[in-house]
Image (cartoon, helix red, strand yellow):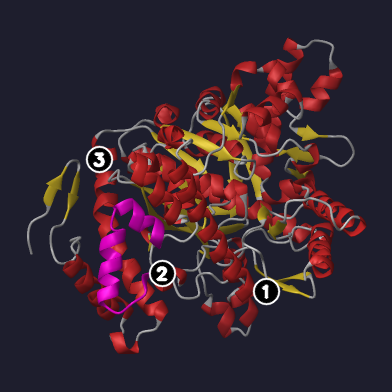
Amino acid sequence: MKDPISNGNIFIADDDRTGNTVPILKRAILENLFYVVGKWPDAATDKDHFMALAYTVRDRILARWLTTKEDYIKYDVRSVYYLSAEFLMGPHLANNMLNLGLQDQIREATHDLDQDLDLLIQQEAEPGLGNGGLGRLAACYLDSLATLAIPAMGYGIRYEFGMFHQEIHDGWQVELTDYWLRYGNPWEIRRPQACVEVGYGGHTQSWTDQFGIYKVQWIPDTVVKGVPYDTPILGYRSNIANTLRLWRSEATESFYFGKFNSGDYTGAVGAKTFAENISKVLYPNDEDIHGKELRLQQQYFFTSCSLQDMIRRHLFYGHSIEIFHQRCAIQLNDTHPSIGVAELMRLLIDIHGLSWDKAWEITSHTFNYTNHTILPEALERWPLPMFRSLLPRHLEIIYEINRRFLELVRQRFPNDDARVARMSLIDEFGEKYVRMAYLASVGSQHINGVAQLHTELLKTGVLRDFYELWPEKFINVTNGVTPRRWLAVSNPEQSALMTSKIGEGWIGDLDQLRRLEKYAEDSAFRDEWQRVQFNVKVRLTKYIMDKTGITVDPHSMFDAQVKRIHEYKRQHLNVLHILTLYHRLKNNPTLDITPRTFLFGGKAAPGYFMAKLIIKLINSVGEVINP
């Protein structure tokens, strides 16, 4: 075996295990199939061959990943920590091949081994870690941060089951189990040595110490263990691999022999059941109080795990806890991790002994908050009795944050009791609730929407009072999607055409696509562009036929709406538009109208009847209109 050779700031082993030539790749695939998957080629399934290929690709990421970590420590960098309840990553294999620049070599190697690379790519399960735009935004950020070589780490939950697998029966959505981990996950590495503990319930005790300082101890009645699973997130041709750390909830003691031997078989595994439920499923049905409790348990679980991990890493690097905010920038992806404001205060005050003022200085300069909705009814809030039962110490901290915050509001806007009531972190209009978006707004240094219009609507709508108090907090960060997955991987024909004209630099810099403008009047280029697009539509029509038996004209205009099914997403208005066009044609068969094919994609939450009814409406209209 040869010694590693230097390649800039990265060390890549130039040997039979991690080389990039076709012969070495072929041997690596076969060795992983034999030594890791445990199969002979003749006995291996397509899934086995996928796993062998995935491990082969992962081997080539690990050197970059470990060296990236070493460099971050060596250069003592400030890091971005992205907290999100969802990471809609998508399958990893094709994206990692692109980012490594090994697509052609791997295609040749698999061809030589009598394997169909496209078929192997299709074997990878969709990671059940996200639901919609919020989760995809998180995934795109991780991709971009690694590509731009920005030190960053994503934190979330390693859900055992995704939201659900959807089938349509008689026009109605039917939910089936989405066990995406059924065949294992070749990209993750379990890190049990970095586990942390998270408490729930119980009570608090307070006293004044010998120095006259007020102290509080939280004594939870239930404690679970958070075990991290790390996945490398490789940047595009950057040689940088950041980390997505996902937490699995486990019992601190999974089996109690005493209870078992006394005949309490259920009690012997009760703690295991409670703990594992926390990371069991993405977005449990929260129509009843038990579902709501589980959602709050999930949110606190991954947020507490992540903050404890950040502090551990910060102290391990030799930094004082007093400069935590100077080394760590935390982005809250919507309100799901906003309990982190109270949790960081608890950790700083109760565990690390800081004063309230110092802890608040650190906290309020650490967090930043991304808002995802302008609908007041969609802003997350928790019933006060439930919150107090699960997180008694955090409610005490939130009350104190609120008391100090409302004092500031009264100073800035004297004699405006209505404003004070509107801005309170506790909603006291009727049943009392904790307003999580308000907690995030008070505890964050910056607040942003996901588009310029969205940010402006926050200023004039749901967060107007906060904008009037702190206009400097509001900034805009416009959403984007990575061109790697959504063009280079998903549409290779169009990508190849663009690359043939302007080179492949656009894959890492979308601004370079402007260089295509000079071909706008090039008839040959336009013809080729249309040919590529038409071929993609033909492929889609074949897929639709295979899946549904419906014949689609590839020459028609494709009008697609793919997103979560919800009233405010307005799929029902789209259906009304379809019915309008249909009736116009029925009344005037000679009407000159562009042929259209309407495509819908999306899931409705299991407990959301109206959204499920919209799915039924779409399918019923299709039954009438489709030939």
Residue plotted at (69% across, 54% down): 564
Q: For the residues marked 2 and 3, what is the alpha-carbon distance in whole angstroms?
A: 35 Å
The residue at the far bottom in this view is 43
Residue holding disc 3? 71
Which residue is drawn at the image coordinates 76% and 43% (left, top)?
Answer: 378
Residue 571, position in %: x, y?
A: 77, 52
Q: Quadrant of residue 35?
A: bottom left
Whether residue 124 sits left or right of residue 409 in the image: it is left
Q: Nearer the viewer, residue 109 or 79?
A: 109
Quadrant of image for the N terminus? bottom left
Residues packed near mark 1 inside 10 Å, few (<14), some (14 to 19) or many (20 plus)? few
484 vs 213, nearest the viewer: 484
Q: Which residues are magenta?
A: 93-118
Q: CA distance from mark 3 to mark 1?
A: 51 Å
Kindly state the secondary structure of the residue where label 3 is placed.
Answer: helix
Label 3 sits on what residue type?
Answer: Asp
Among the 4 quarters of the image, the one containing residue 340:
top right
The type of residue carrying mark 1 is: Thr
Looking at the rendered structure, the secondary structure element under dot 1 is helix
Q: Tell me the residue that label 2 is attached to.
A: 118
Q: Which mark sits nearer the N-terminus, 1 or 2?
A: 2
Q: Which residue is mark 1?
A: 548
Please provide percent x and percent y for residue 379.
74, 40
Predominant secondary structure in magenta?
Answer: helix
- Cα–Cα gap, marks 1 and 2: 22 Å
